[in-house]
Amino acid sequence: MTEHQDRPVIAIIGAGLIGRGWSIVFARAGLPVRIWDPDAGLRRALPARIAEMLRAVGMAEEVCEQISVFDSLADALSGASYVQENGPEKLEVKQALFAEMDGIAAPDTVLASSSSALVASRFGEGLKGRARILVAHPVNPPHLVPVVELCPSPDTAPEVMDRAEALHRRVGQVPVRMSREIDGFILNRLQAVVLAEAMSLIGQGIVSVEGLDDTMRHGLGRRWTLMGPLETIYLNAPAGVPDYLERYGPMMAGLADSAARGEAFTAQTAERLAAAFPPADHVPERSAQRDAKLAALDRHLRRYDTED
Amino acid sequence: MTEHQDRPVIAIIGAGLIGRGWSIVFARAGLPVRIWDPDAGLRRALPARIAEMLRAVGMAEEVCEQISVFDSLADALSGASYVQENGPEKLEVKQALFAEMDGIAAPDTVLASSSSALVASRFGEGLKGRARILVAHPVNPPHLVPVVELCPSPDTAPEVMDRAEALHRRVGQVPVRMSREIDGFILNRLQAVVLAEAMSLIGQGIVSVEGLDDTMRHGLGRRWTLMGPLETIYLNAPAGVPDYLERYGPMMAGLADSAARGEAFTAQTAERLAAAFPPADHVPERSAQRDAKLAALDRHLRRYDTED
């Protein structure tokens, strides 16, 4: 590994939106990126598609110079010390892909999956190299939202977690290291409880879709973006966390006890949500606006954090 | 009311942190603010305390010129068309205060409470003017976080809700109108489910306090700040909300079913949280940093939204 540590080579396997975003993350940090996708048409289009993603958010197109497209999985993996896999969320597909990569990649190459729904023990089980396999789950798009959840299987070696964590920190992402597998990791568990309660409140007619989003956008979300939910409560009572929990803990526990669960995801509420937004053909344009806003917010937060 | 509508007079009753923040909200929008607190020492200190709050976040001190301090509740209410009450969260105190205000204020004056824990039916019950009483629950500090939850009691008149909503919109807040009372309103219900799940994941040792906060700060929180949780899912599947719910609804419902409830608020996890943050004597300094960051974020978001 020593020859790689100064400038590790990254392989990106699967070049959909997430894979292309990852290629930008590593390339803009100056690391050589080798990318492959099974779709030959997509492979040919990749340089132009990645350049377009960079332009869309005001990033320098020179980043592309770090990225090379390869026509085979084996070529892309050659010399890589870290692989970020972005295939479909289907168990059989991931199992086959990880078995193939485990057979080809050098023994000390780390194999990480962007999977949001499958844990590493399910697609790494039984493989010789299961100790070097983990999940590194990003938020879409990873070049604009820096968090990455690092989740080991029971077989993942601690030093593999160390290497993945150090690499993501080096390229400017924010790695969140988990100690063991749990469905939904951290981020989607938090998202699920908010969506369930949101759908319940809307389903009961207590608040509109817009009102619910406004409560988060112009209220809670701002504190959580600057500090997270726990530093928020540390600063929300004069004597810190114990004071907060003494004052508000029983109320919060009571609200959690009365919160909605999975039954809130009804077809009727889904229709109400759908009716509150423009038709789906507006999604691409609105997604592009979202990405521009995420990029501007990321720049604002990074600038502000260094000013501390 | 007609003589008030061009430039309504605002009374702020109770001048703690929340009351002072409210005085800034209305005064910076050019409205005359009349403020009273039962503590004579605090009343004398108010002009300096409010000027200090303005300086701390880079706001113009001339805002103070709109704010007048009065020595009695009756004087503060004189001529006011909207009252924002910020007394202690104790039922007997609020009942007595609203009974007194209802007896003094002109019949068409709106009486709103900043209460986070008590609903208006509890402190407005039996009062002659109960139709003009509502909760207008802010996030602390209201001059830096614009959301305000407007919650009627069963007795609150729709036109009172209309007037409160129009006033808050006029002064640059983001009013969220609820159709009826529910404990925790919207914001604290969402906060409660996230805190319960966060405490559970930390209590199980799956993630650190810092890792949990990072997941929100550098991940989910950013999307939610720009769009809210529902527009987030609208943009997270190619064909909008129905597509999202078909792909991820069952997973999200399953995660919500397995989520933590009030039992996650254990003393042991509370200790773990407390240990992750500096001692409570750092809270004032860290709160000041938070406020500066909230102010900068608010400026960033308002600038960006007008550029759309």
Image: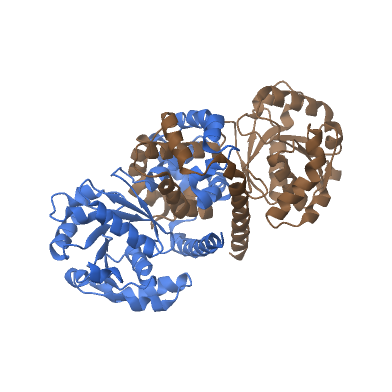
Chain colours: A blue, B brown
Which residue is more in the foreground, B183 or A244? A244
Task: Name which quarter of the figure residue A31 lies in.
Answer: bottom left
Which residue is more in the foreground, B70 or A2? A2
Q: Along the horizontal axis of the image, is A39 left or right of B98?
A: left
Residue A219, percent from left and from top = 58, 46
Which residue is more in the foreground, B245 or B186? B186
Residue A243, percent from left and from top = 55, 33
Residue visible at 75% across and 47% down?
B50
Rendered-image quadrant of the C terminus of chain B? bottom right
Can residue B165 be seen by looking at this rendering?
yes
Residue visible at 84% across and 29% down?
B104
Q: Along the horizontal axis of the image, is B193 left or right of A10?
A: right
Can residue A197 be seen by looking at this rendering?
no
Task: Name which quarter of the figure residue B158 lies in.
Answer: top right
Residue visible at 37% across and 39% down?
B201
Residue visible at 68% across and 33% down?
B134
- The total number of labels drawn is 0
Residue A113, percent from left and from top = 27, 57
Residue B239, percent from left and from top = 39, 56
Rendered-image quadrant of the N terminus of chain B? top right
